[in-house]
Amino acid sequence: MSSPNPQQPVAHGVLIVDDDPQVTELLQDYLEGHGFRTHAVPNGERMRQALARQPADLVLLDLGLPGEDGLSLMRWLRENRDGPVIILTGRGEAVDRVVGLELGADDYIAKPFDLRELLARVRAVLRRTNASSTTPGAAIFAFQGFRLDTKGRTLQRECGTDVPLTNGEYALLLAFVQAPHRVLSRDELLNATHGRDAGPYDKTIDVQVGRLRRKIERDAAQPALIKAVRGAGYLLTVDVQRLSA
């Protein structure tokens, strides 16, 4: 057997959690044909076993699982690992989709899905995750009693307390601190956090803004730091100081 080429990039590993063998076979064939390593499991127990053996770079999680459903597994994933998650939902599962995003999913795609769109979403989430973990010119953004460190991808309060952020929340906050006092449209924010444009009924950014507000606002019901601008988007209302890391 030939030795691996040290210059050849290591293929990203994708764990597919779905109980439909036709879906998992389709996804595995397609993703492996585009250079990914894949593994498929039908339920939460097998998912935990698979992650314990070999951590995945990304999890594709179906929300419509029997028994321990996808929302419960999404909660477990966020409590036990930092890697990105894309949820798969049925067309009629809009409420579950929103809840999944609120629990920390990085993106979603509705079934039946276009394989090219799914591939683009997977690549965008992994690209954003990789870029944020190797940020060139790392800096610390200080604002309103918080310090966002782009080198360690950490958010701390002045007292030193860590504020845990998902990948999507980190990317969203980074977009805001890099452009304080400027209205950022939903399309701009979605491109910054998901690498795609918003559809007419896409509430992904609204959900993520709400989740971020609960972590940094004194009163998320009456936000003072991240304000909504009707018909335009959102803006960070406070000054930001950029410090060397």
Image (tube, helix red, strand yellow):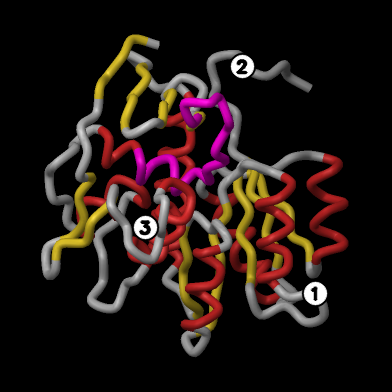
Location of mark 1 (residue) = 68
- Looking at the picture, does residue 233 appear above or below residue 199? above
Image quadrant containing the C terminus: top left
Q: Earlier in the sequence, mark 2 or mark 1?
A: 2
Determine the residue positioned at 34% across, 61% down.
205
Q: Position of residue 46 (x, y in %)?
A: 85, 60
Label 3: how many Cα within 10 Å (few below 14, some 14–19, many 20+): many
Determine the residue positioned at 63% across, 74% down.
63
Q: Give the side of residue 66 with respect to residue 243, left or right.
A: right
Q: Which residues are magenta?
A: 156-173
Q: Earlier in the sequence, mark 3 or mark 2?
A: 2
Please give the label number shown on residue 209.
Answer: 3
Q: Earlier in the sequence, mark 3 or mark 1?
A: 1
Location of mark 2 (residue) = 5
Q: Residue 190's quadrant in the figure?
A: bottom left
What amino acid does circle 1 point to? Glu
Q: Position of residue 210 (x, y in %)?
A: 40, 61
